[in-house]
Amino acid sequence: MESKTLELIDLIKSRRSVRNFIYQKIDNETIKEILECGRWAPSGQNSQPWKVCIVAHPTVKRMIAEQSEYGGIIESAYVNLIIFLDLDRSYDRTKDLQAMGAFIQNILLGIHAKGLGGVWIGEILKNKEKINEIFKLPTEKYELMCIITFGIIDEAMEGKSKKERERRTIDEFIDWY
């Protein structure tokens, strides 16, 4: 897929959640470039409280997919990033959660900038202990934040399911003082 150079504001405004993928390999260098975007997210006291398990193996994807109502999306994408809050690097819950949101958003923007599609799956949090078990990560040290599923966009399928994106107007959520 041809990669476009977008201005930052256009990149932010054109990013969307993609749930339909063509199963095609994404090289490790591209995955690392996307994770590099996340690495530069702000975090309180520069704690960088994230841990990521990169999953491309079909058996592991199936194990994860069984824990989510969005299992088909998880299995159809080439890569899944299982994102945890590293509690040993944590120092303030609110600031850590804000840092995790910034980390996740930076990754989603990196995916989009590379011409790929991705979606943030939070529904799986209802089974976060089971996800920790899959990776043999103790729940007292790692807390699941989400899964980011990404891959090459199946444009034909996305076109069929694409609905108009709506956003509240700025005036709906601001007050001037």
Image: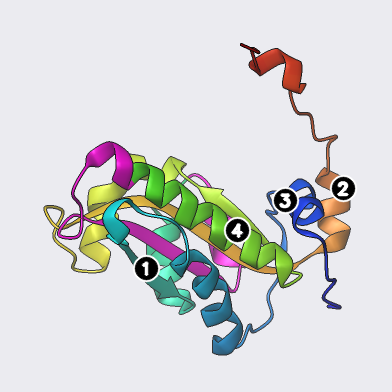
Q: Position of residue 61 (x, y in %)?
A: 45, 68
Farthest residue toward the front?
177
> Which residue position holds label 1?
52
Give the alpha-carbon distance from disc 1 to disc 3, as whole Å: 23 Å
- How many residues crowd around disc 2 within 10 Å: few (fewer than 14), some, or many (20 or more)? few
Judge by depth and name the residue closer to the eye, 27 or 7. 7
Give the alpha-carbon distance from disc 1 to disc 2, as whole Å: 32 Å
> Which residue position holds label 3?
12
The residue under label 1 is which amino acid type? Answer: Val
> Which residue position holds label 4?
108
Q: Looking at the picture, does residue 163 appear above or below residue 33?
A: above
The residue under label 3 is which amino acid type? Answer: Ile
Q: Quadrant of residue 49?
A: bottom left
The numbered mark, 1 or 2, whose residue comes first in the sequence reads: 1
Judge by depth and name the residue closer to the eye, 9 or 158. 9
Q: Quadrant of residue 79?
A: bottom right
